[in-house]
Structures are given as C-alpha cells and as structure tokens.
Amino acid sequence: MDIIEGIVESSPEAVVVVDTSGRLRFINPAAARLLGATASELLGQPWRHLAPLVAGDGDRRVPPGRPLRRRAREVEIGGERLRIETFTPDDPPPLVEHLGDGVNVVRAHDSAIVYVNPAFERLFGYDPGEILGRHVSVVNAPTERDPLAVADEITGHLRAHGSWRGEVLNVRKDGRAFPCWAVVTSFEHPTHGLAWLALHSDISARKEAEAALRRAAEAALAATRAKSAFLSRMSHEIRTPLSAVLGVTDLLADEPLSPRGRDYLRMLRGGGESLLALVGNILDLASLESGRITSRPRDLEIAGLIEEVVDLLAVLAAKKGLALRITTAPDLPRRAHADATHIRQILVNLVGNAIKFTRHGGVEVHAAADAFGRLVLRVSDTGPGIPAALHAALFDPYRKLSGPRIEGQGSGLGLAITRSFVEIMGGTIDFETGESGTSFTVVLPLARPRDAPTAAPPEAPRRAAIGARVLVAEDDPSSALILEAMLLHHGAAEVVLTRSGREALDAWRRTDFDLLLFDRQMPELSGIDAVRLLRAEAARAGRPRPTIAIISADAFDDDRRACLDAGCDDFLAKPLTPSGLHDLLTRLARLRTADHDHHDHGGDAGPDLDARPTQVAAST
C-alpha cells in the first residue's frame, strides 16, 4: 500500500476519496492545490460544499476556475464502501492558457460559456470562473441591435458554415464597450458535444489609430482644399490685372510709337510674360500636388505636335541666334493615342529650358519609338553642363539651385512640373550632362489610335468675328475695354458690355446675339450660373441656341471642366492675348457654322461637349 499511496500522492491528477456520508476521507496534494487548502484542512469536510460550481454531468469546476473532467467509481476497501473521484484538466492545451488574446468555449445547445482562458477574463474584466455558465450574449455590447440577436446571427452562421470571423463590439463587466476582432470555429467537445471555440483580439488601439489617420487625412484634405481655394483666388486676383497689362501692350503694338517707346513696350511685355509664366508654374505645381490633374488621352499626330511646340518656341531661339531643329526616327508612328496636352507641356518646358540656358550653338528635339512601342523624346542643348552636386535635387520643386547653367534663371519649378506630367502618363525622365551640353530623355507609353484620321478643318479667317454681334459680361472695367477693342479688331459688328451675369441675361432677353463671352466670377450672378439660366430659358422659349464661352482668370483644369459641364461651348484662361482670343473666336465660329448647318437639316442644335474638342489657351 505504501507504493500505491506514494503514486497517488505524486500524481498530477487530483484524487479524492469520499465515504458514504459524503465526507472526504482522502485527498492528494494535486486536489488540495486545486481547492486552495491543505489536506488537513479539507479531510472530513463535506465534498458537496467543496465543489460548488458544477458545469454539467460529469464536470465539476473548482477554484481557481479550471474545467476538470471527473471520473468516479465505487469500490469496497476493508468492508467499507468508498467513492474514488479523479479530476484531470479538460481545457485546451496549456498554450491557450498563456495566449495574450482572449479564448472562450461556448456550448452550442444553450450558448453557455464553459471555458475562458486568463486573457479572456482580463480582457472582459471578470474574476476567475465568474463568467462561466452565462449566456455568450453577455459579452456583446448593446448597439442598435440586441446582443441576443447578434449572438443568434453568429450562431446561425456557425451552424451553417462551421466558422465565422468579423469585427464585433464587445462589452466589459463594467459596461465599457470596445471593438474586437473575433475568429470562431466549431468543434466537437468531448464533454459538451458541439461547441464554439472563439479567439477575441482587442482592436481598440488599431481603431484609434485608424480614426487618427482619418482625422489627419481629413485635415490634410481640408488644407489642400483651402490651399487650392487660395491659389484659385490668387490666380484670379493676379491674372485679371495682368490681363489688362498684357492686353494694353498688345493694343499699343498696333499704334505708331517711337523706337524708344517700342523698347519700353517690349520690356513691359517681357516682364508681364515672365510673371504670367511664374503664375502658371505655381498653379500647375499646386494642381499636381493635390491630384487635380489627370491624364486625358486622345488621338494625335506625334510629329505635328512636336512641330507645333518647336514653331511656338522658334522665335525665342532666333532672338538668341540659336539653331532649333527636329529629327525623327523612321520607326516613329505617325499617329497614337496619348495625352497631347501633357506631351505639349513637357516639350514646352524642356525645349524652353534648353533655349534659356544655351548661349551658343543650338537645341535639338529628337523623337523615336523604342522596342516596346513607347515614345522616346530627347531634348539636347549645347549650353553649360549641370554640376554633379546638383543632380540629386534637380527635380525638387522647393529648392532653387545655383550654378553656371541656372544662376538667376527662372523659378526652378519647370523640371519638377515636367517630371510630374511624365509620371502621370506612366513614363520616365532622365538626363545626361557633362562640362558642356545636356540631354533630357523622356519615355512615354503610347496606345494605338482609336479613330481613323480626319480631314483638317478649313483655314479660318484672320478676323474671326466678322459681322458678329457679341455680348460681353465682365465686371473688371479694364478687361472689358480691352476685350471690346480686340473684338472690334477681329471684325465684330457690335460689342455690348455688361458688368454682371444678371445684366447679361437682361440684355440677351431683349435681343439675340451671335456670341456671348462671360467672365466666370462676377457680382450678383456668376458666369456659370448665368449660362445655366440662359440655356434653360432658351430651351423653354424655343429661341436659337447661343454660342457661349467663359473667359476666366480661374485657370485650373477643374475650372474649365466646370464651365463646360454648365453648358459653355469653350473656355479661355486669362490673360487675354490676340492669338488666344483669335483661336477662341475661330473655334466658336466653326461651332456656330456647324450648329446652323445641323439645325437647317432638322437636327438638334444642342452641343455634344464630349465629341467637340475644347482647348485652353496656353500661356508661356
């Protein structure tokens, strides 16, 4: 018996012996530890008082709350009948006890909690064993849905699919709610049958971090909107007087002036154009940073686009005595589908920089296609090279670099803007330089053209407003007078000036006009609102559809789109230039002719804004 007694004493299983009166006759150390007392204190005590938590048939729960599997058998020893009970741990493996996440087991048939690990009790704020036997809905926080309904929904999903995972709002014992990520799976419990094993991860910190990120993103978005609104106001405030300055210089160019007067006029014009280019660069950079500029591909002729840019800048090269030439590889496709506006801006910036920084020699623009069908544009010059110390910051918009090539030249924004346009199109830009000479290489993806080439439009007359009756709505007196003079110069028969959208509507109600030119920002009624009202009123009254354009100092692409969406036929950014106004009048003249022809054939004279090409006059 000594050997057997020694084995029982050292067994990790809890062993108790109960006599017929229900009192403890023997208890081994493992059982005493579970009961939290010594053997001498427990012997002779009623067993029913020492195991107060009974989880079900065959199960007892004793402090400190560990589930135990009970085995009992009746024996007769020395003529006395005794009951030997053994208790072995029936909970998941010890690893679960040490997990940092809460784990619980729920009996399927009545949704009672039959096991929790220590982390679960800490997470939910319960004492050991306190939550056992309670309905699982006790941990669901009351929201707009009843906790019982939430528990039933999860249980239904488990019965149908065997597992469930998702975010739930749980509640601690003290009533504080907190978010959890729960993963639940079904399994066959050896004692309880079908049961649910759940893992609960507190995601409060993650949710708080996500909320902080959302707040930061909202604050950043608000700051971006505020910056965009500020830049839009500054654009309007700067471009409006600048339009007057440049407009007057254009008008004075047609007047008899002395040689010194023409020199002064040329200096005035050059200063105004430099200021306009700087404003344009700042607005482009702001638009790019805020994501307001996207790629809008269309069919284009590549060589023609390059020639257009080179022709535009040829005068600048000629003034400096520089050669400016184009070379194209035989493999260059004639037509492609890409963003012509971005390609034009990239070339204007690169070729313009090359001319600016080259004193002797020339500039070459080479166009080819690589093995992958991408467009390769290389702009090379014979000017000073770029020092190696400046290479890393060359495309940085917020650093004004210094050196023999760039000292005192421009704002330093051009290359940063160019790189942004290239990246929007999914391309790359790189450069090579030495002691003299620099080459910038741009590689851009191209798509096949979508449509067959169309015939070029007929040549427009130089005086594109001949015989037209024009209604102008412009609240700035200087801009109004300059626009009137330019329109008369282009052959307008009559120009009626109004100072607000309301006055313009009243004038149009009295008589028809061939062309309406509205400023966007005006008192009483904005240009866009006036266009909307006018379009609706003309349709109701059955009046001829007027041709309308907005001439605005708000030069962002979003502003242009808003005008076209409101029903305008075209858009021109201030400041006004003779060439920009001529191009606008030419497009509108063609549009009026097309609409009249369509109307004469019984068609709807309404505009097809998606099909009609619209342009914004570029200012350099």
Image: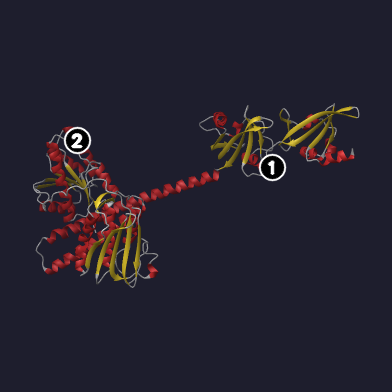
Q: In the figure, 616 relative to 186: above or below?
A: below
SS type, badge 2: helix
Mark 1 or 2, nearer chain start: 1
Distance, label 1 to label 2, CA atoms, is 81 Å
Quarter placement of the C terminus: bottom left
Quickly name the residue at label 2.
537
In the figure, is residue 320 to the left or right of 83? left
Is 113 located above or below residue 460 in the figure?
Answer: above
Q: Label 1, secondary structure: give it.
A: helix
| Residue 533 location (% of width, % of height) | 22, 38
The answer to which of 524 and 264 lies nearer the viewer is 264
Q: Position of residue 318 (x, y in %)?
A: 19, 67
Query: For mark 1, what is the residue?
Result: 94
Three-letter amino acid code of the residue under disc 1: Pro
On screen, 114 above or below 302? Answer: above
Q: Is residue 369 above or below residue 142?
A: below
Figure quadrant of residue 379 = bottom left
